[in-house]
Image: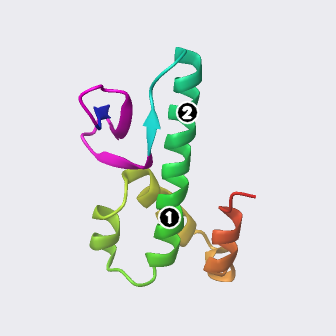
Amino acid sequence: MKHACAAQRWLTLCVYVCVSQVEFERPVDAKGNIEVWLQRLVDGMQDTVKQCTRRAVRNVAEMALDDFIFNNPAQVSLLMACVCMHPCALQVPSALLCDALSDE
């Protein structure tokens, strides 16, 4: 985890074992009871992956494959590769995929 300030209370990014880094959409406040801030951390990670996936859905048709793979987190690139290679993918407009990722 990387902290945003000297007080080391705001978490701003997560480093995965494969050395990729994904910055959180919003910093996560790491104060209070551990159960509370760990839940905020999980919520922050889920929100970040959801936002990355939304951007990937919008960009997949416009980017070269190499650019797409290296400009997205690994799990998002893999997800989009599976979705795009699925036989039904051509029948699903990207707007529906974005709706499926909505916060509602």
Which kind of residue does numbered mark 1 sit on? Met
Q: Is residue 69 above or below residue 43?
A: below
List x then y, in percent, for residue 93: 66, 81
The answer to whether residue 74 is left or right of residue 50 is left
The answer to whether residue 9 is left or right of residue 34 is left
Residue 80 image label: 1
Gap between marks 1 and 2 measured at Cα: 26 Å
List x then y, in percent, for residue 94: 61, 78
Label 2 SS:
helix
Q: Quadrant of the C terminus?
A: bottom right
Q: Quadrant of the N terminus?
A: top left
**Dot 2 corresponds to which residue?**
40
The answer to whether residue 93 is left or right of residue 38 is right
Q: Residue at x 55, y 49 (%)?
A: 47
Can I make out residue 60 in this image? no
List x then y, in percent, for residue 72: 36, 61
Q: Which residues are magenta?
A: 5-26
Q: Is residue 86 above or below residue 50?
A: below
Which kind of residue does numbered mark 2 sit on? Arg
Task: Select label 1 or label 2 by which is in front.
Answer: 2
Q: Is residue 22 above or below residue 43?
A: below
